[in-house]
Image (tube, rainbow, N blue to C red):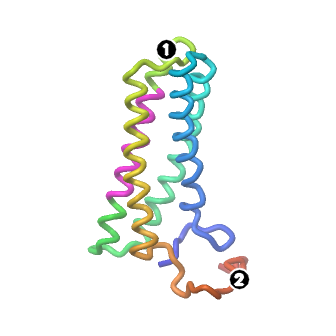
Amino acid sequence: MRSRVRVAGHAVHPILIVFPLGLLTTAVGFDVLHLITDRVTFAFTAGHLIAAGLLLGVVTAAIGWLDWWLIVPRGTRAHRVGLLHGLLNSVVLVLFAVSWSMRLAEQNWVPAWPALVAAWLGLLVSGAGGWLGGELVERLGISVEEDAHPDAPSSLRGAAVS
């Protein structure tokens, strides 16, 4: 099932997912650095990484939901897994949004424990959501070209036409 949202022959959703996932995961890392060192700059950076991750996460999620709606056949296991994948990743965005909004109220964006817990929960849920995304592609063949094989031609071949 070929993704409908494509650039240069490739599905956009898996291209974009690395950005919010990387930004939000790195934010948690900076929170840990803040806890270890008590340096405010680490907390400040974590807050800004969360903001960027949320913005890109919304774009990535919108494209993922569009693909789920347009290409995943209703009544299939893939449709159910895709729904759960999308819902879990939406929870991730909500948890990080809660964490971010709590940081806004703090001096120098230094997070209180509830903000940290929300981010850590978001990171844990993102692991489950990511696993389901892998299940969709690797096990259920969603967004995999029907003619994919080890000697398939470049995806750029005919990209201007598709």
> Magenta segment: does it hold 91?
yes
Looking at numbered disc 1 in the image, what kind of residue is underneath it?
Answer: Glu
Is 87 placed left or right of 15 in the picture? left
Q: Where is residue 65 in the image (x, y as percent from the top left)?
A: 43, 59
Q: Is mark 2 on a helix, strand or loop?
A: loop
How far apart marks 2 and 1 lie (CA) works out to: 53 Å
Q: In which quarter of the image is residue 69?
A: bottom left
Residue that carries the numbered disc 1 in the rendered image: 106
Q: Residues within 10 Å of mark 1 (few under 14, many from 20)?
A: few
- Residue 77, given in percent of the width and then of the height, sits at 29, 72
- Crowding around mark 2 (Cα neighbors within 10 Å: few <14, some 14 to 19, many 20+) is few
Image quadrant assignment for residue 8:
bottom right
Q: Mark 2 points at which residue?
A: 158
Q: Residue at x 54, y 18 (%)?
A: 109
Residue farthest front in this picture = 36
Q: Determine whether 40 is above or below 92 in the image.
A: above
Q: Position of residue 19 (x, y in %)?
A: 59, 49
Q: Which secondary structure is most common in the magenta stretch? A: helix
Question: Residue 121 appears in which quarter of the rendering?
Answer: top left
Which mark lies nearer to you, 2 or 1?
Answer: 1
Query: Up-down: is 96 above or below 124?
Result: above
**Furthest residue in direction left, as rendered:** 75
- Residue 153 forms part of the magenta stretch: no
Kindly identify the residue that appears in the image at 65 percent across and 88 percent down: 151
Image point 57% across, 41% down: which residue? 23
**Label 2 or label 1, whichever comes before in sequence order:** 1
Q: What number is the disc on residue 88?
A: none
**Magenta-tinted stretch:** 84-100
Question: Mark 2: which amino acid?
Answer: Gly
In the rendered view, tell whether residue 56 sits above or below residue 148. Answer: above
